[in-house]
């Protein structure tokens, strides 16, 4: 399970879904839609994912790529 909270000057969104490629793409679209025109640094994404999830590696890579574009990313471990 993937949980994410996006906060920006354009609004905020809580997202919870399975960690599938489709859902990661959907979350990426929400990040894009909530990104202020002045730059990605005004957007913050907090993601919580269970380390036992088979997609955790893909999620970590995806978060690394987002951070490379200037999105402020924080990853939290899901409670057991």
Image (tube, rainbow, N blue to C red):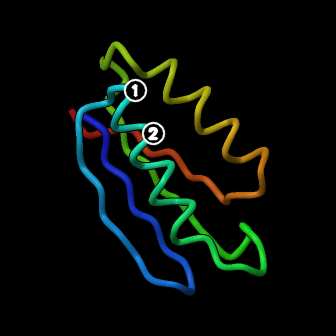
Q: In which quarter of the image is residue 5?
A: bottom left
Q: In the rendered image, which quarter contains the N terminus?
A: top left
Name the residue rendered at 45%, 39% in the picture.
25
Query: 20 or 54: which is nearer to us?
Result: 20
Name the residue rendered at 41%, 76% in the picture.
12
Q: Distance between the residues labelled 2 and 1?
A: 6 Å
Q: Residue 59 carries which label?
A: none
Query: 40 or 3: which is nearer to us?
Result: 40
Q: Element at badge 2?
A: helix
Q: How crowded is mark 1: few (under 14 residues within 10 Å), some or many (20 or more)?
A: few
On the image, numbered disc 1 is attached to which residue? 21
Seen as rendered, the residue at the extreme top is 54
Q: Is residue 23 above or below residue 29?
A: above
Name the residue rendered at 31%, 20% in the picture.
53
Name the residue rendered at 35%, 32% in the picture.
22
Q: How crowded is mark 2: few (under 14 residues within 10 Å), some or many (20 or more)?
A: few
Q: In this view, does 13 lie above or below 16?
A: below
Q: Do the residues labelled 2 and 1 touch (CB within 8 Å)?
A: yes
On the image, numbered disc 2 is attached to which residue? 25
Q: Element at badge 1?
A: helix
């Amino acid at each position: 399970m993937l949980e994410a909270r996006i906060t920006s000057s354009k609004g905020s969104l809580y997202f919870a879904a399975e960690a599938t490629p489709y859902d990661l793409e959907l979350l990426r679209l929400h990040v894009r839609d909530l990104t202020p025109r002045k730059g990605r640094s005004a957007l913050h994404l907090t993601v919580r994912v269970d380390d036992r999830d088979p997609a955790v590696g893909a999620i970590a890579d995806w978060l690394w790529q987002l951070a490379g574009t200037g999105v402020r990313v924080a990853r939290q471990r899901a409670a057991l």
